[in-house]
Amino acid sequence: MSKQFDVIVIGGGPGGYVAAIRAAQLGFNTACIDAWKNGKGGPAPGGTCTNVGCIPSKALLQSSEHYEMARHHLADHGVEVKGVDLDLAKMIGRKDAVVKQNNDGILYLFKKNKVSFFHGRGAFARAVDGGYEIQVDGDKPETLVGKHVIVATGSNARALPGVPFDEDKVLSNDGALRIPAVPKKLGVIGAGVIGLEMGSVWRRLGAEVTILEGLPTFLGAADEQIAKEARKSFDKLGLNIQLGVQVGEVQVGKKQVSIAYTDAQGAAKTLEVDRLIVSIGRVPNTTGLNVEAVGLQLDERGFIAVDGECRTNLPNVWAVGDVVRGPMLAHKSEEEGVAVAERIAGQHGHVNFDTIPWVIYTTPEIAWVGRTEQQLKQQGVAYRAGTFPFLANGRARALGDTTGMVKFLADAATDEILGVHIVGPMASELISEAVVAMEFKASSEDIARICHAHPTLSEAVKEAALAVDKRTLNF
């Protein structure tokens, strides 16, 4: 006999588990289905983000930064360290422990909020009176019926044509997080978020890293001035970033991977590496969802087609996160999940794509919200810009990390903040002030008039806002 629910969420990643919790908080009898398994075959909710994405990558980034600090920078603070050794197995083990803490935390939240969790792969079976029948294919097969269904099945790494991931020599984000030994030579195709973060980790741990990027500009989605500043740091780290390349044949041997490519000048070259990370984007995951059974519509790119409120073509079927249009960001997925749960309850869920922050967790960190200077120029928007370097910030000096700057872009007539861009220490945390300000349509003068604690990195945000009016106090 099938189990009845008000809301069934397929997928337990950031969008899915948050949607399930919010639906339960609103009084709905809610189920969440997720197929991720841990090393022992048990449930591991949290999706790509928790298991092989955001969380483990940040753990490795932090560990590799500590290793780099101990080897090269602690002496600057008067701390003499000798005989620094790398225990990669322990570093990977710590990363795995952090992942498990997050998995267990989600299971606890389900229990706390009375969300029924089903471990297995969820798929549409058919439409029935009062909703949809969902089959759970797991160790304990189940048949569920839900009045509302929220699809949050996420995305998968995009492979190079004809070069499948084996997670040994050719790695997705998954394999890149668990390389058993530091490779002597590591290749990365794609200089986006994953490529730069994983390239940074393994470079700090001792690998010779070459990144091949097809686009002619570095971090084209970021503000050009910020991207140029970041590039200096990556060059200093030793990342060999080649832009404007065209990747040709990739041959996977027993010991090495050979990548034939044409560089930006048209010269034919070959890169020989021990392992290759492919980070050329992600594709929506609808495999096994059985959309044909109910007529759930996909768009021309394979995403589930939704309107501005995440409604699909089917009544009471919703979709959120990476499996629908919009930026593939965990926090975007979470916001959509909450919004859909609230819309089901008759409320007005809120998601503003214009104020979704972007972050790259390299050293230095890169974060931004709103429009870039090049976008404003292309759109013919009159604006004023203000920048402030961390070199002139007292807290950054004390930390010993004065890389980068904060940049404000404001409307020339109204002074409304149009974009804020940061490259430097703790940019991921500093950007939140800008998100709040933009959500409330604040002006750069509003930020300039707010008292910021001293000494803090956030003072650089205030000073950049002051710089819009050409009246910085400390530079």
Image (cartoon, rainbow, N blue to C red):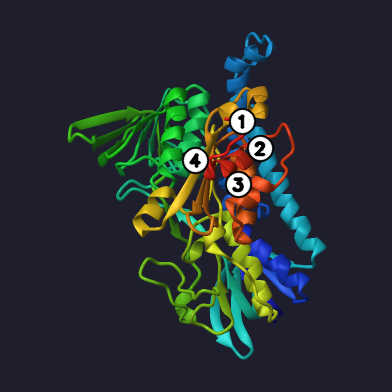
Verify CB contact (< 8 Å) between mark 3 and mark 4.
Answer: no
- Type of amino acid under label 1: Asn
Q: Is residue 296 left or right of residue 78?
A: left
Front position in the image: 333 or 154 = 333
- Type of amino acid under label 3: Ile
Q: Position of residue 410 (x, y in %)?
A: 51, 52
Residue 397 in view of the camera = yes
Q: Which mark is residue 474?
A: 1
Verify CB contact (< 8 Å) between mark 2 and mark 1.
Answer: yes
Q: Which residue is mark 4?
A: 175
Front position in the image: 266 or 11 = 266
- Residue 469 to residue 212: above or below: below
- State the CA–CA distance, disc 3 to disc 4: 30 Å
Q: Which mark is residue 431?
A: 3
Of mark 3 and mark 2, the one earlier in the sequence is 3
Front position in the image: 223 or 252 = 223
The crowd level at tag 4 (other Cα within 10 Å; few <14, some 14-19, many 20+) is: some
